[in-house]
Image: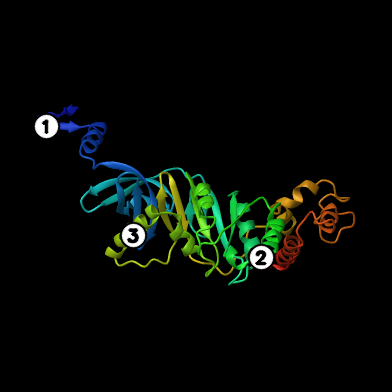
Amino acid sequence: MLFQIKGERRSNGSLAVTADAFVSICTTFTEERMTGKIMKGIGGFYYVYVEGSGLYECRARGIFRNKKMKPNVGDVVDIDILSEEEKTGNLVKIHKRKNQLIRPMAANVDQALVIFAVHEPEPNFHLLNRFLITMEQQEIPVIICFNKTDLATTEQMQQLEKDYENSGCQVIFQAAATGEGIAQIEELLRGRTTIMAGPSGVGKSSTLNCISKEKQMETGAVSEKIKRGKHTTRHSELIHIGEDTYLMDTPGFSSLFLENIEKEDLKYYFPEFEPYENTCRFNGCCHIHEPGCEVKKALEEGKISKLRYDDYCMFYEELAQQKKW
C-alpha cells in the first residue's frame, strides 16, 4: 500500500510527521470496524451481535473506564475486529442511548413484556402494579401477558382484562404449553427490542422457547460462546430472534421497590386516573380521603379497577412512611 506522509523537514534531513498525518497512518492500519448490539456482559467481556456476521467476544477500551461509562446490554456499539476466525474484537464506541434502565441494567428498550401466570403460581398483583409504575417512570410501553390460560376459566380472564383495560397497557393471554397466543406475541415483538420480565415459575422460559427456531439457534450460539470463557449466566441477556428484533431475558424477580417518587406524584403513574384529574372538588386531590373526589366516584361506578385502586392506596401509604434522608 502506497501513501504520502506530509510533514516538515528538519535541519538534519529527518521528517517531522504532523498530528494529522499520524492519525491518517493509524487509520490506514485500523482493524475492520462493525456496528452491533451488546447481547450480554459478563466478567469484563461483552458479547456483540452484528447482523449478518454473528457474535463477537469483545473487551472494552480503557477510555470507557476513564469516562466512567459502563457498556449496557442493549447498547448499540462500534467494535474493531481483532480476529474474524476467533470472533473477537475491541469495543471502541457506544452510540447515544434512547433510554436506560437501572433495574435491570439495560439500554435502548422499546417496550416491556411482563409475564404472569393465571394460576400456578397465583398472580401477585402488587408486584405487577409495582412493575407497571417502574416502566411508567421510564416511559416504556408495557404488554401484560397472562400465561397458563389453559388453567383458567373464561370469567377469570375477563376479570383480568377488565382490571387492566385502562392501565395504559396492552393485555394479552397465552398458553405456552399449547402454543396458544404465541403468534400474537411474535407479531408484537417484531422490529423492536423488548425486555421480558416476570417472577419465577410463570412460564417465561417456555414462552421464550416457543417464539422461534431462529431464537433457539441464536441462544445456543450465545451459550456456546460464553461457555468458552467459563462465565456464569445469571445476568440479563439479549437474544436475537429476527431481523432488528431482540428479546431481553431477565432474571426472575420477587420484589420491587418504588424509588424516586413523591407520594403526591404517585397518581400520575396510574393512567386510569387521568380522565378525572382536573374534575375533583379540590386542586391537588390525592384521591384517597378528600370529599368530592371524581376518582373515588369512578371507582364506585366500576369505571376504575378496585384491585388497582387498592394498590394505589397501599403504595401511597408506603411512600408516606418512607424516611426522608
Q: Which residue is mark 1?
A: 14
Q: Which of the two labelled residues, at mark 3 and mark 2, occupies the earlier sequence position?
A: 2
> Image point 63% across, 68% down: which residue?
124
Q: Which of the two labelled residues, at mark 1 and mark 2, occupies the earlier sequence position?
A: 1
The answer to the question of whether label 3 and label 1 lie on touching residues, with beta carbons closer than 8 A, is no
Residue 220: image tag: 3
> Image point 20% across, 51% down: which residue?
85
Describe the element under mark 1 as helix, strand or loop.
Answer: loop
Q: Amino acid at mark 1?
A: Ser
Q: How is the image coloured?
A: rainbow
Near-viewer residue (41 or 26): 41
Inspect this view and state whether residue 277 appears. Answer: no
Q: Position of residue 86 (x, y in %)?
A: 22, 54
Answer above or below: position of 189 versus 235. above
Q: Position of residue 2 (x, y in %)?
A: 13, 29
Q: Residues within 10 Å of mark 1 (few under 14, many from 20)?
A: few
Q: Amino acid at mark 3?
A: Gly
Inspect this view and state whether residue 321 appears. Answer: yes
Answer above or below: position of 255 versus 141. below
Q: Amino acid at mark 2?
A: Thr
Left or right of 180 on screen, residue 241: left
Q: Residues within 10 Å of mark 2 (few under 14, many from 20)?
A: few
Q: Which residue is mark 2?
A: 153
Q: Position of residue 59 (x, y in %)?
A: 31, 54
Q: CA distance from mark 3 to mark 1?
A: 56 Å
Q: CA distance from mark 1 to mark 2?
A: 87 Å
Left or right of 153 on screen, residue 292: right
